[in-house]
Amino acid sequence: MKNQILSVAAAICMLFSISCKKSEDQATANLRFINMSPNSSAMDLYLNSALVVGNVSYPGPSSYQSINAAATSLSVNQA
């Protein structure tokens, strides 16, 4: 019984050490933009005022872009 409790405690400690380990300094996300408006012109996608994807026409999607996951603003404008 004592060995089982120690085994469970060791397993829990191991899970916490694995989940808390940082593999990267900055978290990233994959972003894909799809223009789903058939009557609009091509669109540009901006992240924090910087162009991420440009000239996306209906119905074509952009390729995936790796971005900073802590980004604060997204905006879409006509190309």
Image: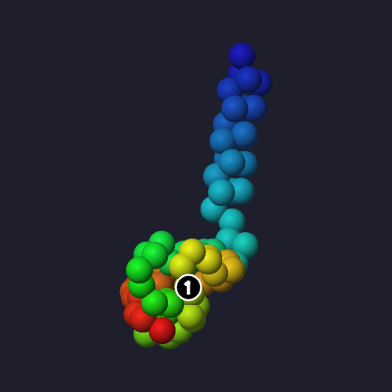
Residue pictured at 62% horizontal, 62% vertical: 23
Amino acid carrying mark 1 in the image: Ser
Residue at the extreme front of the image, as rendered = 39
Residue 71 x/y as whole percent: 40, 72
Residue lying at 47% horizontally and 73% vertically, measured from the top left: 57
Residue depicted at x 58% and y 23%: 5
Residue located beneath label 1 in the image:
57
> Height in image: 68 above or below 78?
above
Residue 18 x %, y %? 61, 48
Quarter of the figure with residue 65 = bottom right
Q: Which sits in the foreground, 29 or 33?
A: 33
In this rendering, the answer to whether 69 lies above or below 18 is: below
Specify the quadrant of the image occupied by residue 49: bottom left
Foreground pick, 11 / 69 = 69
Q: Residue at x 41, y 84 (%)?
A: 79
Horizontal placement of 38 versus 12: left or right?
A: left
Q: Is residue 70 left or right of residue 73?
A: right
Establish if 27 lies above or below 46: above
Q: Position of residue 58 (x, y in %)?
A: 46, 68
Q: Camera-side residue: 71 or 21?
A: 71
Q: Residues within 10 Å of mark 1 (few under 14, many from 20)?
A: many
Q: Does any portion of residue 68 appear in the rendered image?
A: no
